[in-house]
Image (tube, rainbow, N blue to C red):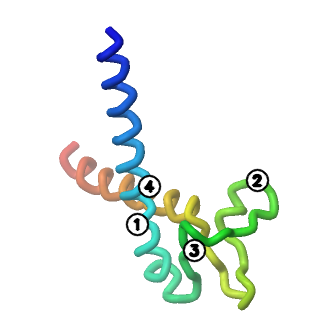
């Protein structure tokens, strides 16, 4: 029983880490494409000021005046992209 719970915990953590990584890097590649180069993707190591905890904190302006998409915003963009891809694959077969 304890090994089952431990395996489930490790599997959940690994799956969550892999999905977050996939969504982050997908979003990081999509930001310049979707914005036609006007917006920049923030780095994980760089601190992004969040004015207040809300969905708008995913997009902030950097010191140069350009819009900067936070890592959380990149994960959200990557998640939306993969949902659209999955729907595009599944819906024609229904």
Left or right position of 84 against 28: left
Left or right position of 85 against 92: right
Question: From what the image shows, is residue 82 above or below residue 40?
Answer: above
Which residue bears the numbered disc 3?
42
Q: Secondary structure at mark 3?
A: loop
Q: Earlier in the sequence, mark 1 or mark 3?
A: 1
Q: Are marks 2 and 3 in contact (CB under 8 Å)?
A: no
Q: Earlier in the sequence, mark 3 or mark 4?
A: 3
Q: Position of residue 19 (x, y in %)?
A: 38, 50
Q: From mark 2 to mark 3, how far is it between C-alphas?
A: 17 Å
Q: Earlier in the sequence, mark 2 or mark 1?
A: 1
Q: Secondary structure at mark 4?
A: helix
Q: Residue at x 57, y 88 (%)?
A: 38
Q: Are marks 1 and 3 in contact (CB under 8 Å)?
A: no
Which residue bears the numbered disc 1?
25
Which residue bears the numbered disc 4?
79
Q: Residue at x 71, y 62 (%)?
A: 57
Q: Position of residue 20 (x, y in %)?
A: 43, 52
- Report the mark closest to the observer, 1 or 4: 1
- Report the mark closest to the observer, 2 or 3: 3
Left or right position of 21 against 54: left
Which residue bears the numbered disc 2?
53
Q: Are marks 3 and 4 in contact (CB under 8 Å)?
A: no
Image quarter hosting the C terminus: top left
> Furthest-right residue in view?
51
Q: From mark 2 to mark 4, how far is it between C-alphas?
A: 20 Å
Q: From mark 1 to mark 4, how far is it between C-alphas?
A: 10 Å
């Amino acid at each position: 029983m304890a090994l089952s719970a431990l395996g489930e915990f490790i599997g959940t953590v690994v799956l969550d880490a892999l999905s977050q990584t996939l969504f982050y890097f997908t979003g990081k590649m999509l930001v310049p494409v979707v914005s036609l180069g006007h917006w920049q993707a923030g780095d994980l190591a760089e601190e992004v000021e969040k004015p207040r905890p809300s969905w708008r904190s995913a997009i902030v302006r950097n010191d140069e005046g350009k819009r900067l998409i936070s890592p959380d915003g990149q994960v959200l963009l990557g998640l939306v992209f993969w949902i659209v891809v999955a729907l595009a694959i599944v819906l024609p077969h229904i």
